[in-house]
Image (tube, grey):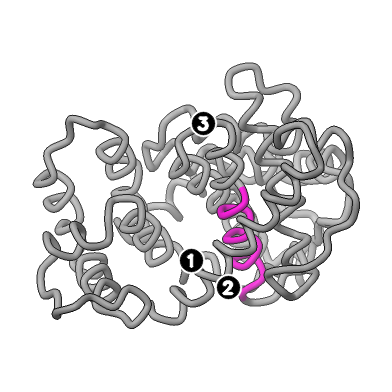
Amino acid sequence: MPSTLPSPLSLDFIDAQIKDLSAAPQILPKLQALIRDCNTNPDDIFTLIKLDQTLTTRVIKTSNSAFFAPKSRIDNIEDAVTYLGYDEVFRVITLVAFAKLMSGPLACYGLSAGELWEQSIATAVTLEVLAQAHDSATNTGYTIGLLHSIGMIFVNKHLLAMRSNKRFNLDEEPADLETDEVTTLGLSHADVAAHVLDRWKFPENVCEPVRFQLRPLECQTYGKTACLLNLAKDIGSKFISSGCRKFDAPEPDPIVVSLIGGSTEDYERTMDKVGTKLAMIDVLLQEL
């Protein structure tokens, strides 16, 4: 019979699961650092990508896609990166690295196959737009948004291993969800996500907003980013529930408006930018 009282989720279990994953995620923090450094030698980026043959192949394939439409065929990673540009290469690599891992069903959260991935992409694109509006590194915002929920995957793996039928309600208030997770497992999915990202050697400015995503006002180091992540999750969910990339959004909360820039027009411009970028991602995903 399935157990309804799972044992606590240990960091050792998480670390063991991490070791079973591909090496692709470990490339991302190094790539992110190289892209942000204006003194980076392009050869360092080429060499890093070449460490993973699958990523190399997919980047070259993407550079030749109808979406990017090069004038002549590209057949090496150097030309592919130069043609696409660093930010687009980073986006492609994150999508390739995490699509399979984050597309499965998560029974303990009531998510069917593809739902977590869809939510994560919407949050990533939204936080990228918000980061740009606040003069922050856009690829950092994109990374945080894409990976903020990755802890749920490890929680689900643990409960499956325990043969537990425990279910968490994502419609609960964040504080209530966190309490339920911590009471059951000893850790929240936000704690798990931050631990995983730390193990992959992502910097503190990525790990800490993820750790405090359920209680952003308590984040003393990167509180603004944690609040923007919370806002990005909310805006991203509106695009998912609407089922389209452009729609008439409801009147925003004044606090949301102040976080975005200060006016309803700023909010509307943000929604338009997010919708446009999501539409581009939709096309790109079909090419990958």
Is 6 left, or right, of 171 in this rendering? left
Q: Is residue 238 magenta?
A: no
Percent from the top left, x then y, of residue 32? 33, 41
Quarter of the image where one finds residue 34 = top left
- The residue lying toward the viewer, choosing from 200 and 148, is 148
Callout 1 secondary element: loop
| Quadrant of the frame with the C terminus | bottom left
Callout 3 secondary element: loop
The CA span between labels 2 and 1 is 7 Å
- The residue lying toward the viewer, choosing from 22 and 232, is 232
Callout 2 secondary element: loop
**In the image, residue 174 above or below residue 115:** above
Mark 3: few/some/many CA within 10 Å (<14, 14-19, 20+):
few
Percent from the top left, x then y, of residue 69? 29, 78
Residue mark closest to the camera, 1 vs 3: 3
Q: Is residue 117 magenta?
A: yes
Characterize the magenta stretch by its predominant secondary structure: helix
In the picture of the structure, the residue carrying the numbered disc 2 is: 104
Which mark identifies residue 101?
1
Percent from the top left, x then y, of residue 28? 34, 48
* Amino acid type at image mark 3: Asp
Which mark identifies residue 135?
3
Percent from the top left, x then y, of residue 190? 65, 41
Mark closest to the chain's N terminus, 2 or 3: 2
Residue extent of the magenta highlight: 114-126
* Amino acid type at image mark 1: Leu
Mark closest to the chain's N terminus, 1 or 3: 1
Residue depicted at x 62% and y 57%: 274
* Amino acid type at image mark 2: Gly
Residue mark closest to the camera, 2 vs 3: 3
